[in-house]
Image: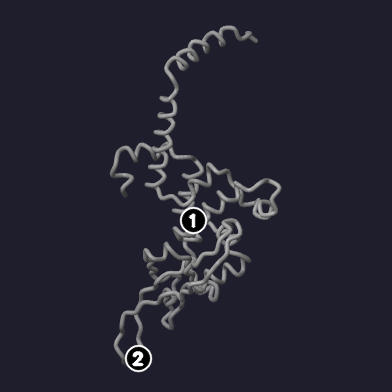
């Protein structure tokens, strides 16, 4: 929202790199999966409606409506793997009153080692995230193989950016570089991963400001001589 409030940030939207705009739109269009919900259509694919004894057709009692999931701000500093807090109601017995209740994921504080970053770190993960990390084989494999929408975490995207930058700095003949070669991206593209829209606009404005300062640092005499040589060189060029 802050991007659309300031005119100078709105103008920078059209000058953002294409790879960032593509990644941002893919993240916005990502449909979060029903993590622990089993769709009714898998068990009863041919029963979206039921026929009553009077011969009329009514909608089935089961609908593929996912529960309302709440992602707190603390989840952005952890790895929850699209698990969240579910709000609903609970009734212990048929005659007992209905009470509101929250269901939260089981969280664990576990140390992980990153080969690309070459350091240990304590990360709070959910049970599903821990399972996916074990299936991937390592934290690096899980972070690099998952999209930004699948991670759904600022911590995860920042780790991905640091890992990709570390991967780009490795020598080409490195064994670690060859192992993660399919995830390698140019450093200019990796620097934009994990940035919000407002952060990306500010980064674009800073890059443009630095380019103007660098151009202004060139002495005017050298710049004038360069401009005077350009038409002379173009005039001396042979005509095909």
Between 77 and 198, the residue placed more toward the observer is 77
Residue 91 lies left or right of residue 188; in this view the side is left
Say which label, 1 or 2, has the lower sequence index.
2
Q: Are marks 1 and 2 in contact (CB under 8 Å)?
A: no
Query: Closer to the camera: disc 1 or disc 2?
Result: 1
Instruction: Determine which residue is flagged by label 2.
Output: 94
8 versus 63 height, above or below:
above
Quadrant occupied by the C terminus: top right
x, y percentage for residue 62? Answer: 44, 76
How far apart in space, not on screen, are marks 1 and 2 (Cα)? Answer: 46 Å
x, y percentage for residue 152? Answer: 46, 60
Between 232 and 4, the residue placed more toward the observer is 232
x, y percentage for residue 125? Answer: 49, 69
Residue in the image at 44% along x and 50% along y: 195
x, y percentage for residue 12? Answer: 38, 38
Residue in the image at 65% along x and 51% along y: 182
Residue 20 lies left or right of residue 131; in this view the side is left
User: Under tag 2, what secondary structure?
Assistant: loop
Categorize mark 2 by other alpha carbons within 10 Å: few (<14), some (14-19), many (20+).
few
User: Under tag 1, what secondary structure?
Assistant: helix
């Amino acid at each position: 929202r802050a991007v659309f409030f300031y005119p100078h940030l709105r103008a920078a939207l059209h000058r953002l790199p294409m790879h960032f705009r593509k990644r941002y739109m893919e993240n916005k269009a990502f449909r979060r999966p029903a993590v622990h919900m089993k769709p009714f259509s898998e068990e009863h694919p041919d029963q979206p409606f039921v026929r009553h004894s009077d011969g009329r057709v009514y909608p089935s009692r089961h609908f593929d409506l996912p529960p309302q999931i709440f992602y707190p701000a603390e989840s952005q500093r952890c790895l929850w793997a699209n698990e969240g807090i579910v709000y609903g109601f609970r009734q212990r017995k048929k005659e007992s009153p209905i009470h509101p209740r929250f269901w939260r994921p089981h969280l664990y504080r576990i140390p992980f080692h990153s080969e690309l970053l070459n350091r240990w770190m304590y990360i709070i993960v959910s049970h599903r995230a821990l399972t996916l990390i074990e299936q991937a084989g390592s934290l690096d494999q899980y972070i690099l193989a998952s999209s930004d929408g699948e991670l759904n975490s600022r911590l995860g995207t920042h780790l991905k950016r640091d890992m990709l930058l570390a991967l780009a700095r490795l020598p080409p003949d490195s064994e670690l570089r060859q192992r993660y070669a399919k995830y390698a991206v140019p450093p200019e593209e990796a620097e934009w991963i994990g940035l919000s829209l407002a952060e990306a606009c500010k980064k674009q404005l800073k890059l443009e400001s630095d380019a103007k300062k660098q151009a202004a640092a060139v002495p005017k005499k050298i710049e004038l001589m360069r401009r005077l040589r350009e038409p002379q060189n173009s005039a001396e060029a042979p005509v095909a």
